[in-house]
Amino acid sequence: MKLIGRRQFLKTSLSGLALATLPAISFSQSNPDVVVIGAGSAGLSATAELMKKGISVLCVEAMNRIGGRCYADTSTFGIPIDIGGHWLHGFSENQLAKFGKKHKDKFKIYPEDAPSVVYDGKRKVEANELWRIYKELKKIRSTNITDVPFITLVPEKIKKSSWFDTAAKMVGDARDLDNFSTYDDNSNWYDPGTGDGLCREGYGTLLAYYRKDVPVKLNTIVSEIKWGGKGVQVVTNKGTINAKACIVTTSIEVIKAEKIKFTPALPARKIKALDGISMTYSNRVLMQLNKKFYNAKRIKNDTWFHTKCKSNGVKSPETYYGSLKMGGSNVSLFGISGQFAKDLGDEGEEAMIDFILNDLKSTFGSKFYKKYFIKAKAIAWSKNPYTLGSYTGAIPGKSRNLRRELRMPVGDRVFFAGEATAMAFSTVHGADRSGARAVKDLYISPALD
Ligand SMILES: Cc1cc2nc3c(=O)[nH]c(=O)nc-3n(C[C@H](O)[C@H](O)[C@H](O)COP(=O)(O)OP(=O)(O)OC[C@H]3O[C@@H](n4cnc5c(N)ncnc54)[C@H](O)[C@@H]3O)c2cc1C
């Protein structure tokens, strides 16, 4: 997700790792002490932590797989390719990176040290002006704690540059600068780790293996949490589960869109916090290209790729970035973000693939498709009913105390985890830590008495 910042893949055993076989569980275990809702990074972590403490737990997941927004698809290209979380942020202290390094036989974990290539039309350029503006915007991003839209902090002379839209997308990541609070980044965020890393086999593969011993009840969609009486009743498409407490780890938008109804309704302070946050849009096009392309252009593994944005002046610049030759494979990742990503995602996968292909053709010539294209897959996270977006960003003007409030339990029986509640929010490792934190909250509450 973050822009600041194989040789041939082993097709063998690793391609099956993302869907690691999970122990089957029967619904007779359906009245545990704790229900964990969602089996993404946070839910798997919370469940593992409860199991460690010997507390009976049932983790339910709406989709037919675990991992949530951190998942490596193996079926499209025959090798594991991340369709969501990919970079191991906070690398120096990232607990999943440390785990992966201990399992050298299965994973290659390495610090990101990727070169960048920039094109202005058909020309490969040094783009000194792009990097200068990018640096200035990065400085504004990392030092400002006024809770106003980022765009209002940008000097007019920077906005006038023909490289501004390209740089704005690089710095804004999944957020357009009119919907970006630097306060959220600088005051609500904490991560002891620094730098970014990568896992050659995919972050999704690593997460699935890290949590391979966690049992999950798949295809189980929660529609209501009743918390007004004793304990909680969690209503699902497979029946109602009675428990002493639950930990909700779904994306914020799933809660905001009332896909899960709370009875009674959540308290006003929680609703206010939910009003202060939204999901950002970061959609993906993954493209398998003939090796000749990478050789002809001398592309190194995991190369950052940018082209000059041609939609100057619009609120959500119509551009994208690339990470070429992921982990040394012949697959490249293209990221489309902001409101433009949402709109394009609404048009469908074909429109997303066409957008990238057309730009690649105008950069590398009209024969690009015929010469190099093998296949592509597009993922619009905004359309996934169980995520409804990619990761969270505070709404400018509403960032103060926001994430602390999102962490707060309700009625000593409904607990909250997930990336939005994490200190290192919007990340896989932050979500993982949030699961353990929610278990701590639960453990020191009277919920299990
Ligand atoms: C395109 C993209 C790129 C990203 N890039 C990075 C990156 O490079 N590095 C990084 O660290 N992070 C990245 N992130 C963010 C990271 O993936 C997320 O922050 C993290 O995976 C969220 O984990 P979570 O457990 O909080 O939520 P989720 O992964 O969303 O897990 C919640 C689970 O709840 C389930 N659920 C939803 N509704 C229900 C229901 N009604 N009943 C039962 N279950 C339900 C969902 O299916 C899901 O599995 C990226 C995300 C996306 C989408």
Image (cartoon, rainbow, N blue to C red):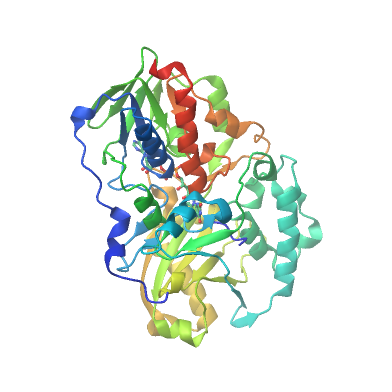
In this rendered view, identify the residue nearer to me: 448 or 303: 448
Q: Quadrant of residue 308?
A: bottom right
Tell me where residue 127 appears, x and y as whole percent.
69, 75
As drawn, the residue found furthest toward the top would be 229
Q: Residue at x 41, y 82 (%)?
A: 291
Tell me where residue 35 appears, x and y as whole percent.
34, 29
In this rendered view, identify the residue nearer to me: 385 or 3: 3
Left or right of 391? Residue 75 is: left
Q: Quadrant of residue 162?
A: bottom right
Tell me where residue 278 appears, x and y as whole percent.
54, 40
Q: Quadrant of residue 50?
A: top left
Is 144 rendered above or below residue 270? below
Is 282 rendered above or below residue 306? above
The answer to whether residue 90 shows anywhere in this view is no
Q: Residue at x 39, y 59 (%)?
A: 103
Give the position of the C terminus as an image quadrant: top left
Tell me where residue 435 appears, x and y as whole percent.
45, 37
Q: Residue at x 52, y 80 (%)?
A: 299
